[in-house]
Amino acid sequence: MSELADRIRIAAKRVGGLNRLAQQIEVPRKTLGNWLAGTSPKPDAVRKIASVSDVSLDWLISGEGDPDEDGYAVLARRTDKKIQDQMSPEEFSEGLRRGLERLTGSNQPTPAQPSVDVKREVIRAVRQTYDDAAVTAAGDDIALVAMDIFATLTSRVRDIDDESEVRMVLTHLIHHLKHDLREAARNPGHGKREAS
């Protein structure tokens, strides 16, 4: 019996036995028996076994590490010793998770949490822009526009604590709001925001 066969048996115990494992990975029980006798399963089958039994793929393939290790822990174990000495496995795992989220997500940096002062400044700027354009809007409408501008602001600045960067981007966004309000006044019912 090969070592892989032993690890497949351990994985099978986690899901309720060999018959159950065969069902979950959608292979005949006889095929699973062949693997236990020493025939090598295809890589996709090994991946499925790891997935349904919730064991580490690295452990299932190589026998190294712990069956309960996640991919981050495996990568941390294989990473350059110098990096490992500089951070704990938890820090490495968290940093890797955040990096992967950025790569697989929106490709936008995770926005920082801005201060209440920045939020107030956005609301004041939107309210002032509506007042300057002599456009009457309900408080809820002002709040919705401010929320949109705030979301755009936080996605465009690199450092939300950099007042000059925030001011510059906010000025640009308010300029677009002024343009939208002028267009709405010229063409009521055709713009994003209607002037009243």
Image (spheres, rainbow, N blue to C red):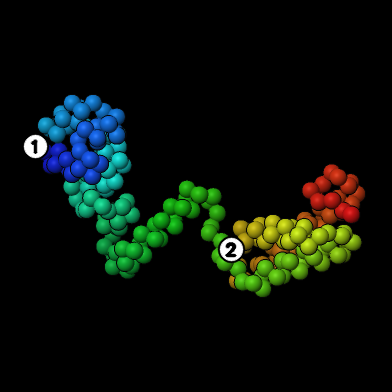
The amino acid at mark 2 is Arg
Residue at left offset 70%, top offset 70%: 120
Earlier-in-chain disc, 2 versus 1: 1
Mark seen at residue 100: none
Quadrant into which the N terminus falls? top left
Residue 164: x and y in percent read 67, 71
User: Dot 1, crowdedness within 10 Å: few (<14), some or many (≥20)?
Assistant: few
Q: Nearer the viewer, mark 2 or mark 1?
A: 1
In the image, is 95 to the left or to the right of 86? right
Residue 175: x and y in percent read 78, 59
Residue 176 visible somewhere in the drawing: yes
Q: Secondary structure at mark 2?
A: loop
| Placement of 39 over or under 65, stated as above or below | above
The amino acid at mark 1 is Met
| Placement of 108 over or under 47, stated as above or below | below
Report the residue marked by disc 1: 1
Asked if labels 1 and 2 touch by Cβ distance under 8 angstroms, the answer is no
Spatial CA span between label 2 and label 1: 57 Å
Residue at left offset 21%, top offset 33%: 19
Q: Kindly indicate the quadrant of the structure image that contains residue 173.
A: bottom right
Residue at left offset 24%, top offset 36%: 21
In the image, is 32 to the left or to the right of 82? left
In the image, is 172 to the left or to the right of 47? right
Q: Kindly indicate the quadrant of the structure image that contains residue 92.
A: bottom left
In the image, is 64 to the left or to the right of 114? left
Residue at left offset 30%, top offset 40%: 52
Mark seen at residue 158: 2
